[in-house]
Structure formats: C-alpha cells, structure tokens
Image (cartoon, rainbow, N blue to C red):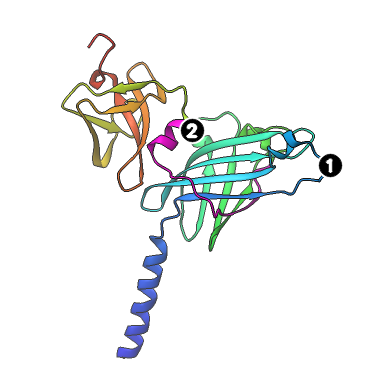
C-alpha cells in the first residue's frame, strides 16, 4: 500500500511541477535563402518569432511575427493573451469584439510550440501568403524581456505618472472590475499609455520577477500636464 501511495505521490509532484513551468522566452524558426539573393534580402531572413511573457499561473502575453521570403517579403503580426491547459492554448480575438475571427491553436511539446491557424490569414491582419502555422523552437540567443524591451513594442506610447497615493489597476476599460488580488501603482510611478478611453488608460509593465502586469487605470488617478 505504501509503495502504491509513493508512486502516486511522485506522479502528482511531477504533474504539478510541469504545470508550473515558466514558458517565458523567445521561440522561432527560419527558412533558408537561396545563394542568389541580394545582401539586402539576406538581412530579412524569412521565418517566425514568438515571444511569451508570463502574467500569472499558466496565463501568458504573446507577440507573434512571421515574415515570408522573396520576392514579396510579406509580414504578419498579432498579439494577445493565452492560457495553457495541459500544454495547449487557444487565441480567439472575437472575445475582443473583432469583426473578423483570428483563431490560433498553440501546442507545447518540450522546447517547441506549434501554432495552427483555424482561420484565414487576412482575419489576423497578415499580409498575402503569410501563415501563422509553424513550429517555434526555443531560441539559443535570448533577449532580456524587461521593461526596456517592452517599451520598444510601444515606441509611440506616451509616459504618464500616478498622482494619487495609490492607483488601482482594473480588468475592464470602464474601471469597475478589480483583479483578485487587487493590483496598484503608487504615487509618481510612471507607466506607458498604450491605449485609452474617455475615462481610463491601458498599460503594461514587467515586474521585478519578470511577470507581465496589465490593466486599466482611471484618468482621475493620473497626473495632468499642469500638475
């Protein structure tokens, strides 16, 4: 009886450890170019890149970038939030009120994440002939995924500051749905204005342990130009 219990315990520990594995990092693939291409074309290597940054639990923010080869060199880019369950995840932008559904299926196997599209590339805003489908393998050369990297993804985002002692981050753009546990920024904290409504501003930042935090901040908690 003890032997059976011990075996079950090992399985539970291994399963738990696997579910908590942090997938944050850069994955990708590249396609070979013919020797006849120009030097300029060699600098634009066709392939794909997938970036994952953990939010919490098995939830991740992702950025996907795919480039085809000559002569068109068409590009496809999309991003969003996915949750891995048993090494699989789905992205469906119809939950974001998108007019055309962009549905992607993610499958993790070891250090490779496969993506299969369930809709046309045009629905994802991709260029002609670009597909999200592919096997993205953990890259040997990894960039440091910190706030400096994140700012490069939003080059035109203005930087704002919190004016109140504590400003709460909300799950919804109306500023009513709190996170659990609640998330806050403190007075004089700076943040990027990635998007905004009449009453709120959307932001993202990476915390000290490398996880990505996101949310909507009420404009009443933000310093104005005159303050």
- Secondary element type, mark 2: helix
* Callouts 2 and 1 close, C-beta under 8 Å: no
In percent of width and height, residue 75 lies at 66, 34
User: Considering the image in quadrants, where does the N terminus appear?
Assistant: bottom left
Judge whether residue 141 is colored magenta: yes
Q: Is residue 130 left or right of residue 188?
A: right
Range of the magenta residues? Answer: 131-152
Left or right: residue 128 compared with residue 10: right
**Can residue 44 be seen in the rendering of this structure?**
yes
| Residue nearer the viewer, 183 or 154 | 154
Residue drawn at the location 33% of the way across and 28% of the way down: 191
Q: Residue at x 34, y 33 (%)?
A: 215
| Horizontal arrangement in the rendering, residue 122 relative to residue 183 (left or right) | right
Q: Secondary structure at mark 1?
A: loop
Q: Position of residue 226 (x, y in %)?
A: 25, 8
47 above or below 153?
Answer: below
| Residue that badge 2 annotates | 96
Residue at which label 1 appears: 36
- In this view, the residue farthest toward the top is 226
Residue 175 seen anywhere in this rendered image of the structure: no
Q: Is residue 220 magenta?
A: no
Expressed as whole percent of the image width and height from the top left, the position of residue 184 reads 23, 34
How busy is the neighbourhood of tag 1: few (under 14 within 10 Å), some, or many (20 plus)? few
């Amino acid at each position: 009886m003890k032997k059976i219990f011990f075996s079950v315990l090992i399985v539970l520990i291994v399963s738990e450890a696997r579910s908590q594995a942090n997938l944050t990092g850069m994955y990708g693939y590249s396609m070979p170019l013919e020797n006849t291409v120009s030097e300029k074309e060699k600098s634009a290597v066709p392939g794909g890149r997938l970036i994952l940054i953990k939010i919490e639990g098995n939830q991740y923010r992702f950025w996907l970038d795919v480039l085809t080869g000559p002569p068109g060199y068409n590009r496809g880019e999309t991003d969003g939030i996915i949750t891995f369950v048993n090494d699989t995840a789905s992205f469906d932008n119809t939950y974001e009120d998108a007019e055309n559904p962009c549905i992607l299926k993610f499958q993790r196997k070891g250090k490779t994440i496969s993506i299969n599209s369930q809709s046309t590339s045009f629905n994802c805003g991709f260029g002609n002939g670009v597909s999200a489908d592919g096997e993205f393998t953990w890259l040997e050369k990894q960039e440091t995924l910190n706030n400096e990297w994140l700012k490069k993804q939003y080059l035109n985002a203005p930087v704002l500051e919190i004016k109140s002692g504590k400003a709460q981050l909300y799950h919804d753009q109306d500023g009513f749905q709190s996170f659990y546990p609640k998330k806050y920024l403190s007075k004089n904290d700076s943040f990027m204005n990635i998007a905004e409504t009449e009453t709120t501003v959307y932001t993202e930042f990476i915390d000290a342990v490398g996880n990505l935090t996101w949310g909507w901040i009420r404009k009443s908690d933000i310093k104005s130009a005159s303050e």
